Image (tube, helix red, strand yellow):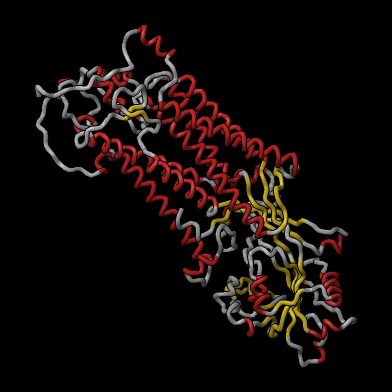
């Protein structure tokens, strides 16, 4: 040991009161503060962009029912814009939350004096890892900033992904079953008594269709194309329909409308109102089985409830040549083309809340950058420098002291420690993580997988008769009547802010869970890498990695414990999961249009109903 040479270590912290006062005047050359600066810059830029985009949207497009319409038109274009916008939103939110997480870990890191105070009380603090335990021992100013940063993250998780949302366009339409003789007739435009269908202006609609056919403006669809076009949850490009069947040999049926129905609307209401999630049951008319009968003295023995219309399970889509309606074989359809009214909306109230939260978070990070002058022990290197310069009297002489010797005890004293023999043993990375952290992360991940599996089973169960492989045909981020969570149905006109906010909270709860998992994984990996860095000094000689005033061979760094090769993939994976979650459980706003109302009220178009419901897509429930 006589030939051993030690490199002097220079400490930047002292107990001298004059030195403590002088530290507030130190130049800002601490590397960890560069990370705080980047976090403040990123958060401020995102806040500025959010503000500019919101002002532009409201000034350019105006506001209706609390939201601005950014785009109206093609539903395919709206879908692609929505996917792209939410990808950008999750990139922005990941930048904000990563900067906030970095700042919170810096704030919870102790100073040497705080470690000494803790040791004097017989307790210990975490160094180099995210720690809630440290909060009871750090300065009150840093504690309050840490708490405010944590609280300000909650609104971002719950609302950011719902600032921009889509409003789907659904057409309410009439279906008329007739034959070619009716098309060529100008006199016999008879329609069965509407009866239970109510006072629909069907006589006007059938005349409109007849005139449109004479003008050649109807689109001819073969049976397979007709089924594909109308066997959808939301019909946006087609309207009223003529189903042309084979001509009857009976002269009494020549040139008649044999039957008519209405379709297209999905009705989901609260209270005791009925729920209708079968918008195209007319397609399966002759194939549906009755699930429940009732007997009436006036109506006789009739069916009260039919099975759900699934054109794939019932073989209608695969055998369009055998498609029958009202016991008549379908030859072709004549469809009315309509304009699409899908919309991409920005909710002003939610945008204002996100901008305010974003601004508060940026202000807190900037405050941390300018006000935090303490020399924090952010990593293993900082701790080694400090303890070699000023040995800790409590643990002096216990160089082989391990975590397992301290953590089981609520309090300890110097008399509890002392020299001990060295036992060489290999330990896995997982041994560096506390049992509480391990249980927390695995429990949360397991519960998340169980919930995702339950949602997947729920959607699969609702897809009556469908095979598991059919889940992949639903489409990415696409609402379906099979996957609507109907218990969250709200009454009409819930495009307004109050109704939207209640559904947004439900839809974005998974975002909060995913963020908790991300922070748990971050802490988990940080603990393992801290132990790896400490152990590596016994194998390879290298300079310490410090965050404050490097000396000699010491290396200055602004990242805390996770190098970019670990943190960058984690941030990208987190952003991807948040985006997938936003496309898995989301608010669906639907506007129902009835073009036939212009015949009654003289309007060019009429919005009948707007509903807000929760929807999840079973396909995207898998990776989330």
Name the outermost residue toward the top.
Answer: 18
Q: Give how far across and how far down residue 555 sits, in percent.
A: 33, 29
585 or 23: nearer the eye?
Answer: 23
- Above-or-below relation of 352 to 225: above
Residue occupying image coordinates x 66% and y 63%: 234
User: Quadrant of the rendered structure where residue 122 is?
Assistant: top left
Residue occupying image coordinates x 63% and y 39%: 351
- Above-or-below relation of 442 to 353: below
User: Quadrant of the rendered structure where residue 105 is?
Assistant: top left
User: Quadrant of the rendered structure where residue 484 is?
Assistant: bottom right
Left or right of 330 on screen, residue 559: left
Q: Give how far across and how far down residue 581 sits, in percent.
A: 51, 51
Name the outermost residue toward the right.
Answer: 187
Residue occupying image coordinates x 56% and y 29%: 360
- Above-or-below relation of 303 to 351: below
- Above-or-below relation of 192 to 127: below
405 or 80: nearer the eye?
Answer: 80
Left or right of 328 on screen, residue 597: right
Q: Give how far across and how far down residue 301 sits, in percent.
A: 65, 78
Residue occupying image coordinates x 41% and y 54%: 450
- Regarding residue 489, the answer to whether it shows in the image is no
Q: Give how far across and how far down residue 206 sits, in percent.
A: 82, 73
């Amino acid at each position: 040991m006589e030939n051993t040479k030690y490199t002097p270590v220079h400490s930047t912290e002292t107990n001298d009161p004059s030195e403590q006062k002088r530290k507030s005047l130190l130049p800002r050359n601490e590397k960890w503060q560069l990370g705080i600066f980047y976090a403040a810059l990123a958060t401020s830029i995102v806040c500025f962009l959010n503000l500019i985009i919101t002002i532009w949207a409201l000034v350019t497009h105006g506001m209706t029912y609390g939201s601005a319409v950014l785009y109206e038109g093609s539903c395919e274009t709206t879908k692609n814009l929505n996917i792209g916008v939410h990808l950008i939103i999750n990139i922005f939110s990941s930048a904000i939350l990563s900067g906030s997480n970095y700042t919170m870990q810096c704030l919870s890191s102790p100073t040497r004096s705080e470690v000494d105070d803790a040791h004097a009380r017989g307790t210990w603090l975490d160094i180099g890892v995210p720690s809630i335990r440290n909060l009871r021992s750090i300065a009150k100013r840093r504690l309050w900033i840490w708490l405010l940063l944590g609280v300000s993250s909650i609104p971002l998780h719950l609302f950011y992904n719902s600032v921009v949302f889509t409003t789907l366009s659904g057409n309410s339409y009439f279906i008329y079953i007739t034959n070619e003789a009716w098309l060529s007739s100008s006199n016999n435009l008879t329609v069965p008594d509407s009866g239970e269908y109510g006072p629909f202006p069907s006589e006007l609609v059938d005349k409109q269709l007849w005139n449109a056919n004479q003008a050649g403006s109807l689109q001819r669809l073969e049976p397979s194309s007709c089924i594909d076009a109308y066997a959808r949850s939301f019909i946006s490009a087609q309207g009223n329909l003529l189903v042309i069947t084979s001509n009857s040999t009976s002269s009494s049926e020549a040139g008649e409308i044999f039957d008519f129905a209405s379709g297209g609307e999905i009705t989901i209401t609260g209270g005791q109102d009925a729920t209708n999630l079968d918008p195209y049951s007319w397609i399966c008319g002759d194939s549906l089985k009755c699930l429940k009968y009732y007997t009436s003295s006036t109506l006789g023995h009739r069916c009260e409830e039919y099975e759900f219309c699934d054109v794939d399970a019932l073989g209608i889509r695969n055998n369009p040549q055998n498609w029958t309606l009202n016991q008549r074989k379908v030859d072709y359809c004549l469809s009315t083309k309509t304009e699409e009214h899908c919309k991409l909306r920005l909710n002003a109230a939610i945008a204002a809340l996100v901008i305010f939260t974003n601004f508060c978070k940026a202000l807190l990070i900037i405050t941390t950058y300018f006000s935090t002058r303490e020399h924090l022990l952010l990593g293993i290197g900082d701790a080694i420098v400090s303890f070699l310069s000023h040995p800790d009297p409590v643990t002096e002489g216990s160089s082989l002291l391990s975590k397992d010797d301290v953590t089981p005890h609520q309090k300890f004293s110097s008399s509890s420690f002392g020299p001990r023999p060295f036992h060489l043993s290999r330990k896995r990375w997982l041994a560096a993580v506390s049992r509480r952290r391990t249980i927390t992360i695995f429990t949360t991940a397991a519960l998340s997988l169980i919930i995702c599996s339950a949602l997947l089973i729920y959607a699969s169960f609702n897809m009556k008769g469908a095979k598991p492989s059919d889940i992949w045909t639903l489409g990415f981020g696409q609402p379906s009547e099979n996957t609507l969570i109907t218990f969250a149905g709200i009454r009409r006109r819930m495009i307004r802010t109050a109704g939207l906010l209640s559904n947004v909270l439900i839809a974005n709860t998974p975002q909060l869970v995913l963020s908790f998992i991300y922070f748990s994984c971050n802490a988990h990996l940080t603990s393992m890498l801290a132990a790896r860095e400490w152990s590596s000094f016994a194998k390879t000689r290298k300079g310490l990695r410090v965050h404050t005033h490097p000396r000699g061979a010491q290396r200055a760094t602004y990242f805390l414990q996770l190098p970019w090769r670990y943190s960058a993939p984690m941030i990208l994976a987190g952003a991807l999961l948040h985006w997938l979650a936003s496309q898995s459980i989301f608010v669906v706003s639907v506007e129902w249009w009835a073009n036939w109302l212009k015949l009654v009220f003289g309007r060019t178009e009429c919005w009948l109903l707007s509903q807000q419901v929760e929807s999840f897509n079973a396909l995207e429930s898998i990776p989330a």
